[in-house]
């Protein structure tokens, strides 16, 4: 994409409106300019673009002089505890550092800060990065959808219990509890979109299917399917086979069902796949 080129008239109009409003974001939105570019122009011109906290600090210092505690003064002024602590100690914050009352200046070193981070953040995405096609694929109704996760977030924020959320969604309370426990990725709590990305990232199974490669096990299973054996019969027969690679599927008839469904009709026979609950004994060899 080609970057936009601004003329001298565009910059002059930006500074004219900025002098009237004093809000860089508002002027950028009104003119249709890129907000980051407008902030860059303001910084290069020496215009302060941050939040002016001088009035808040003066009010905080008056409250402290009257004997109000730091926590109460910070709450009345509307600032966080860290800023109140700095104001109490006479510390002034500057871009990229701090100035102490004795004149000492401390600069933040980005490399030193990141060196002490145990798990550095590599992206600004909450949750695992997932392909968009996989994220939007609806697998089955038994899995929670994005709409359900958004409703869980709303009901959870309202203070509803797990059972109340489950009744509202037609799900069990254990499903809701497991969803919140497994898919909460940040310290701010349960977020529906991040939870949906985490759940979608668990879907792919990277291991190879046992009957996918050409092997003695696959030849044995396909040979029995040609004889119209059911998957249950093959699974029961594998219990008595002494070969180690042929005994790996002895208790998994459902795996044999999936393989028979992917096979040709001649290999499956005329009856088609049967349910996994059958207890039909294997015929004699």
Image (tube, rainbow, N blue to C red):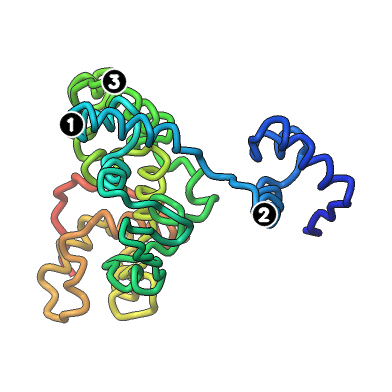
Q: Position of residue 17 (x, y in %)?
A: 76, 34
- Quadrant showing the C terminus: bottom left
Q: Which mark is residue 40?
A: 2
Q: Secondary structure at mark 2?
A: helix
Q: Which mark is residue 8?
A: none
Q: Is residue 226 visible?
A: no
Residue at screen point 50% across, 38% down: 52
How crowded pointer 2 is (Cα within 10 Å; few <14, some 14-19, many 20+) is rated as few
How crowded pointer 3 is (Cα within 10 Å; few <14, some 14-19, many 20+) is rated as few
Marks 1/3: CA distance? 32 Å
Res 221 quadrant in image: bottom left
Q: Nearer the viewer, mark 1 or mark 3?
A: 1
Q: Mark 2 or 1 closer to N-term?
A: 2
How crowded pointer 1 is (Cα within 10 Å; few <14, some 14-19, many 20+) is rated as few
Q: Position of residue 44 (x, y in %)?
A: 68, 57
Please tell me whether residue 235 is drawn above or below residue 13 in the rendered image: below
Residue at screen point 28% across, 45% down: 82
Please tell me whether residue 67 is drawn above or below residue 238 in the rendered image: above
Q: Nearer the viewer, mark 3 or mark 2?
A: 2
Read off the residue under disc 3.
Answer: 158
Q: Quick check: 241 left or right of 33?
A: left
Residue at screen point 88% across, 51% down: 8
Q: Position of residue 112 (x, y in %)?
A: 34, 73
Read off the residue under disc 1.
Answer: 69
Q: Is residue 199 visible?
A: yes
- Quadrant showing the N terminus: bottom right
Marks 3/2: CA distance? 41 Å
């Amino acid at each position: 994409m080609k970057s936009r080129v601004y003329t001298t008239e565009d910059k002059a109009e930006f500074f004219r409106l900025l002098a009237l409003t004093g809000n860089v974001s508002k002027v950028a939105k009104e003119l249709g300019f890129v907000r980051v570019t407008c902030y860059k122009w303001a910084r290069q011109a020496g215009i302060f673009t941050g939040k002016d906290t001088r009035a808040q600090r003066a009010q905080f210092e008056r409250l402290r002089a009257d004997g109000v505690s730091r926590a109460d003064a910070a709450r009345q002024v509307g600032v966080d505890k860290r800023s109140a602590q700095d104001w109490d100690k006479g510390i002034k914050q500057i871009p990229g550092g701090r100035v102490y009352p004795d004149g000492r200046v401390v600069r933040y070193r980005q490399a030193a800060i990141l060196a002490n981070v145990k798990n550095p953040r590599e992206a600004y995405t909450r949750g695992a990065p997932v392909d968009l096609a996989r994220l939007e694929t609806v697998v089955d109704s038994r899995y929670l959808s994005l709409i359900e996760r958004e409703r869980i977030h709303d009901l959870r924020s309202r203070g509803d219990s797990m059972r109340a959320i489950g009744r509202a969604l037609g799900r069990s309370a254990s499903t809701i509890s497991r969803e919140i426990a497994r898919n909460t990725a940040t310290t701010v709590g349960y977020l529906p979109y991040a939870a949906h990305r985490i759940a979608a990232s668990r879907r792919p199974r990277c291991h190879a299917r046992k009957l996918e490669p050409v092997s003695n096990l696959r030849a044995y299973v396909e040979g029995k399917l040609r004889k119209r054996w059911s998957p249950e019969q093959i699974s029961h027969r594998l219990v008595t086979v002494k070969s180690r690679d042929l005994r790996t599927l002895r208790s998994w008839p459902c795996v044999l069902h999936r393989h028979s469904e992917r096979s040709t009709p001649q290999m499956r026979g005329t009856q088609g796949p049967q349910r996994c609950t059958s207890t039909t004994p294997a015929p004699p060899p």
